[in-house]
Amino acid sequence: MNSLGHTLSRLATRAVRRYLVGPSQRWTFEPPAPGWTPSRVERTSLYLHVPFCRSCCPYCPYTRVPYDEALVKPYTSAALAEVDWWADRIGPAEVTSVYIGGGTPTLALGSVACVIGRVRQRFRLTGDVCIETNPADVENATIAQLHDAGVRLVSLGIQSFRAQNLKLLGRRYEPSIAERALGLLVESSFASVNVDLMFALPGQTVGDVIADLDRAAQLGANQLTTYPLFTFPYTSVGEYLRLRAVRLPNPRTRRTHYRAIGDWCAEHGFERVSVWGFKRGAVPRYSSVTRDGYIGVGPGAGSHLPDGFVLNTFDLASWIDAMRAGRAATALCMPFADEMSGWWWLYWRFYDGRIPLDDLDVALGRDAPKARRWLRVVEQAGLAVRQAGYLELSESGAFWLHLAQNHFALSYVNTLWTEARRQPWPQAVAI
């Protein structure tokens, strides 16, 4: 986008934000005020970030460091301290899910088990424990440890079953390793096994995408998450992607692949459960993002609290030092104006693909009429249809939402994470 287009886009974004949320919402992340502490909550979720990787994939934007056994013990101590820090401040809340991401969490399963145990001690854990892993790290011993820790939902980051695509993405395993890992997980009685697959990669055809979907289904995956490479909010393509052969896919390619994925899923019994996700059968839905509230544990972990967002320092050493000293690891906060929580709720319902119309009044309060006007426009444009009390996105609606998400929401994350990666304790960051 040229500079004029970028300027016009920012002006339009600001105008829409002001109209929807009002002038009182400040779109700036700042260091927390001295003595800041979160309010008590009755119900939330928990995200645990494990930053270790055997090899750091060049397209991944998340906080991660090369695996070093010497770092696991101080990481574990700090994570346990942060669980206690949250429990001491928000109280013994009900935790409706635990999501464990990274990095590669299965590289430090002893640590993960300790943290889950502490969560059970300090909170009322009532929901599922979900974890990410990579094909090269799945062994029978790994699976036994996952079951022992109470993990029920697993996501396997395969990305592609084609060797040339794995090489392009910097993935250091052969397709046979991915197939073996998926087979082991499917045979191991997890409630849900999700597979991550990428589309619109350079040189990738529709036939290639369909072949990947076919293979995942043949091996028994009951959920599929599909996304183009740039959907992950990396901070700068030039700085963090570092793959000369990779270019952002053009909208036509994305559209063609996305439609083919939707058609294939419909033909093979996979229902859409989010903009990117599909599941088959009555299995628990695996999702890494759609939580109405959560607390974050680990370097770079974010928290969505009733009154705003907070973000931990991205730097592993700084996070460990803060926890050792009994201080909050919070680097940045963005408080919510009164209207913001409702619109944030609606955003994630769009991501789910289904907006419960009867819940609008409770979620948005006085802004509910405004939301209904916007939803009527969405419906009249053919981007959604009414179904038994819900407004459900059509296939084209889901696609256009993904484009909007990449253009707006991910650009916010891009701005914020660029600064958060640059220094452990950033100053104000306007998004």
Image: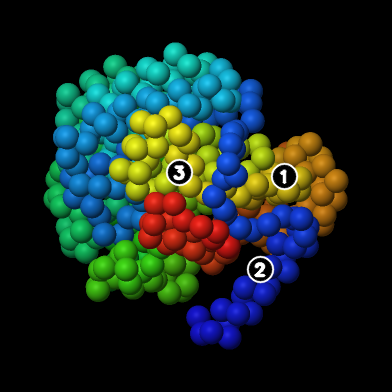
Is residue 392 or residue 322 the one in the foreground?
322
Looking at the rendered image, the quarter that the C terminus falls into is bottom right
Q: Secondary structure at mark 1?
A: helix
Say whether disc 2 or disc 1 marks the residue closer to the N-terminus: 2
As displayed, is residue 149 above or below residue 57?
Answer: above
As displayed, is residue 186 above or below residue 366?
Answer: above
Percent x, y for residue 165? 23, 61
Q: Secondary structure at mark 3?
A: strand
Is residue 290 or residue 67 the one in the foreground?
67
Using the numbered discs, state the Cα–Cα distance from disc 2 to disc 3 in whole angstroms: 27 Å
| Residue position marked by numbered label 2 in the rendering | 13
Percent x, y for residue 209? 33, 58
Say whether disc 3 or disc 1 marks the residue closer to the N-terminus: 3
| Residue position marked by numbered label 1 in the rendering | 342
Q: Is residue 249 visible?
A: yes
Q: Is residue 216 visible?
A: no
Percent x, y for residue 241? 30, 65
Using the numbered discs, state the Cα–Cα distance from disc 2 to disc 1 in whole angstroms: 18 Å
Nearest to the eye among marks 2 and 3: give it.
3
